[in-house]
Amino acid sequence: MPRADFYLIDKPRFREQPLLLVCELAKKAFAAQQPTLILTRDYAQAEAVDELLWAFDEDVMIPHQLAGDDDDADTAVLIVPPDIATADRPLLINLRETCPGGRYQRVLEVVAADPAERDGSRARWREYQRLGFELHKNDM
């Protein structure tokens, strides 16, 4: 059964910079040797995640890149802006406003503290539930 985990941001560290939580989740996935996709809302957000992954932890280097190169399949963490097709991976971090298509063992939803973000996450929760996902909520 696929699983969806919702990470609801509340801590000041993540509230000020929600993409830090994305980096922390990517770091855990890389340590567990799980190839990961990060689906971003737009190209600017993809670039922001890319830059932050280089700088957020000086003791860790997470191999990552923006999707669209020949070596995408060999990259541990692939950052995917809209309109770029990629192969499915077991783990997906979703920053988009809709549930992703495709087949994933686990989806991580990062939800900012903004009330509009929370409303969107409730709709995605219901959609994952309808699709038969095991659901978990994590307060961050």
Image (cartoon, rainbow, N blue to C red):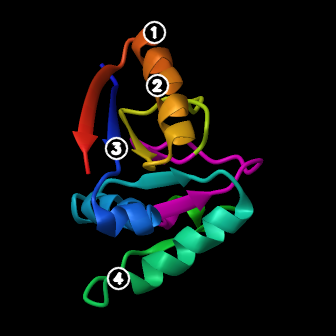
Which residue type does callout 3 highlight? Leu
Dot placed on the residue nearer the N-terminal end, 4 or 1: 4
Give the Cα separation between the discs numbered 2 and 4.
Answer: 34 Å
As helix, strand or loop, the secondary structure at mark 2 comes to helix
Cβ–Cβ below 8 Å for labels 2 and 3? no
- Label 1 sits on residue: 130
- Label 2 sits on residue: 122
Whether residue 70 can be seen here: no
Give the Cα separation between the discs numbered 2 and 3.
Answer: 11 Å
Give the Cα separation between the discs numbered 1 and 3.
Answer: 21 Å
Magenta segment range? 74-95
- Label 3 sits on residue: 8
Q: Residue at x 55, y 31 (%)?
A: 120
Q: Is residue 137 above or below residue 132?
A: below
Q: Position of residue 16 (x, y in %)?
A: 42, 68
Q: Is label 3 or label 4 in front?
A: 3
Dot placed on the residue nearer the N-terminal end, 1 or 3: 3
Which residue type does callout 2 highlight? Arg
Q: Is residue 25 left or right of residue 84?
A: left
Crowding near the residue tagged with mark 2, few <14, some 14–19, many ≥20 C-alpha atoms within 10 Å:
few
Q: Position of residue 82 (x, y in %)?
A: 72, 49
As helix, strand or loop, the secondary structure at mark 4 comes to loop
